[in-house]
Image (cartoon, rainbow, N blue to C red):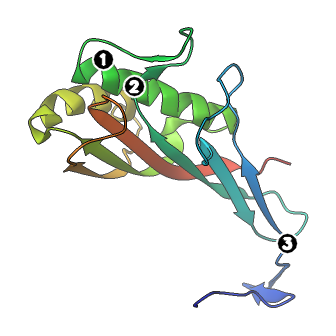
Amino acid sequence: KMGFALPSAFFLAGLAFSPAALKKEVVVSGWPALPYPFSTGIIACLGPAGLPAACSLSLAGQQGFDFAASPPALVAGGIANETRQVLLNLAAVAEAASSSLDNMIECTVLLTDIKDFELMNSVYKTFFVGEGKVPPTRIASQVASLAGTAVVEIKCSGWAPHPS
């Protein structure tokens, strides 16, 4: 079994760091509780004790579910509508962590049909491309299937402010 353990204190660039870490679940107000054993988002921080710092933010893969619907349901209309809803869902999780999609540095796109790439990309770019924006790195892959009947799932990682 491999692992990494921090010493009781360590120094980097002349700053004393303690191994006190923060791992916090991101909860979106108004969304139902997840029926599965994972979090919609996690903020993880490690840094100088007492100094505010940016933290890593991991957003779980989202499908095109409309959580305002009762019960929540996959949006109709195909790849473009699902992609739009996926990115709105990811934005909601990022905002619940006091962050935004502008702070994402990497995204993974899973498609059930790679032929949908151009339609997905036409919606995706409206969330990440624009004046002063730096789009995250990305990989897009075809998978045999996704949970349920979804045709796209996207997950992203980036940063959020320390939730102190």
Q: Residue furthest right?
A: 50
Residue 139's x, y, as percent? 27, 53
Which mark is first along the chain, 1 or 3?
Answer: 3
Which mark is first along the chain, 3 or 2?
Answer: 3
Residue 149's x, y, as percent? 30, 28
Q: Residue at left 42%, top 29%?
A: 87
In the picture, residue 33 is in which quadrant?
A: top right
Residue type (three-letter) at the residue carrying disc 1: Asn
Above or below, comparing residue 30 to residue 150 in the picture = above
In the picture, residue 153 is in which quadrant?
A: top left
Q: Residue furthest left?
A: 115
Residue 81 disc label: 1
Residue 65's x, y, as percent? 45, 22
Report which residue position mark 2 lands on: 64
Residue 119 disc label: none
Q: CA distance from mark 3 to mark 1?
A: 42 Å
Provide the secondary structure element on which disc 1 rests.
helix
Q: Is residue 7 left or right of residue 37?
A: right
Report which residue position mark 3 lands on: 20
Residue type (three-letter) at the residue carrying disc 3: Ala
Residue type (three-letter) at the residue carrying disc 2: Gly
Q: Are marks 3 and 1 in contact (CB under 8 Å)?
A: no
Q: Are marks 2 and 1 in contact (CB under 8 Å)?
A: yes
Provide the secondary structure element on which disc 3 rests.
loop
Q: Residue at left 91%, top 64%?
A: 50
